[in-house]
Image: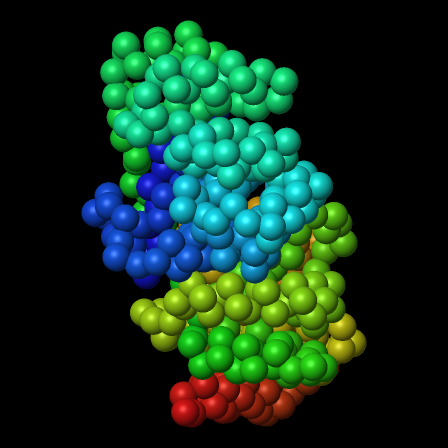
Amino acid sequence: MYSYVARQPILDSSLQTHAYELLFRDSLENVFPSISSRQATSRLVVEQFLQQNIDQLLGGRPCFINFPHDVLLEGLAECLPPKQVVIEILEDALPDDALLAKVQELHQLGYRLALDDFTMSSAWERFLPWIHIIKFDLRLSPLPKIASFIQRHRHLRLTYLAEKVESKQEFEQTQALGISLFQGFFFSRPEMVKRATMQPAQMVVIQLLNEVNQSEPNLVRIEQLLGQDVSLSLKLLRYVNNLKGRSKPISSFRQAAIYLGHTQLRRFVTLIATSGAGQGKSAELYQMSLIRARFCELLALAHASTAQSQQAFIVGLFSLLDVLMEQPMATLLGSVPITDEIRRALLAKEGKLGFYLTFCEDYEAANWPRVAMHTARLGLNEEKVSQLYLSATAWVSEQLNAMDQP
């Protein structure tokens, strides 16, 4: 499976790339698909920020993302890193009291906000003290009208962006008005970017939705569900990483759930469900990831503490990410807040966690001399190790069968 996004540069007055606008696509055809703006924004956030390392796409620059009225009010923007994102309020958003309150809240949280295809309606005047960027569509707004607006609002610290610039003359005319950011076909058409992606099992998403909407969510059950799907668990850790102030690395999915709290956890699961997650994953690789996760966990339980076994599960679950995502493991882990022990195990097979993963790989490859050496190190015998592996495969079969139940 692949995700698709169109990336259009936003240039400064020196024609250097200042930022990118990210536009949702569902194929290599560079047109907006026949879906709602709500679903487009949700899927773009999931696929580009939670599924992927967004730094690869942006190269250290910020990005503009379109947000419809209802998605903003639901709090989706707050799961994104303020330093990387400009929240672009769509032109059809209703400038009501609820939206004004949300804009003020986002401003307070450090987000930059832009008004898209700004029509200079007086209904938006009360929003302007909390807005950073005004985008003028040159196909909709005459230059004299734009000049008049800029002149009347000199007292506000607004940055102006001209979009749909289609000629050198338009670039020079808008620059003369005091506009400092530019976007349009004269500079560059949106560039298509295709990236490997994974989709979580829909039944797990439904079960998680049920759990997080309880008055008192069962964290043990939530942890179990998150551990059933490598795609969901990766998204969860990136979601945690995107929230401001996260400094302590994650060593278990329950820790991630506790850190998020009920509201943010429900928001995360709702986002995943809204994005239309569901089909086309590589069943064999996913099943192998789950077997590795459970086998590593059981090896750790036979050798170390429960806390170590939780980390061993994550190591096994993420051990095939580079194959699933068609990217180097080091790149994938760049925006995942896992502990150093987990990171070293995945990247270099170091430490006890790396030993469990090496044991698992040797067992899969039927490298019996090495398996015998690992078995002796753990103080186990071959029969016990065989039982642990069979137990892991049986556990995975139970999980997959449960996911298939209506």
Q: Relative to 52, does residue 216 appear above or below in the rendering?
A: below
Left or right: residue 240 versus residue 177 is: right
Q: Quadrant of residue 121?
A: top left
- Which residue does the image show at 24% across and 45% down from the upper left? 31
Please state which of residues 191 and 227 is positioned toward the viewer in this rendering. 191
Left or right: residue 202 versus residue 85 is: left
Please state which of residues 217 and 99 is positioned toward the viewer in this rendering. 99
As drawn, which residue projects farthest toward the front? 122
From the top left corner, tell me how far across and down residue 331 is, in percent: 51, 46
- Which residue does the image show at 39% across and 59% down from the upper left? 39
Query: Does any portion of residue 192 appear in the rendered image?
Result: yes
Q: Relative to 387, does residue 11 appear above or below in the rendering?
A: above
From the top left corner, tell me how far across and down residue 254 is, in percent: 70, 72
Left or right: residue 19 versus residue 31 is: right
Q: Quarter of the image containing the N terminus? A: bottom left
- Which residue does the image show at 50% across and 56% down from the upper left? 71
From the top left corner, tell me how far across and down residue 389 is, in percent: 54, 85
Q: Give the colour scheme of this rendering.
A: rainbow
From the top left corner, tell me how far across and down residue 226 is, in percent: 57, 74
Q: Quadrant of residue 185?
A: top left
- Which residue does the image show at 42% across and 57% down from the upper left? 38
Q: Relative to 111, does residue 279 appear above or below in the rendering?
A: below
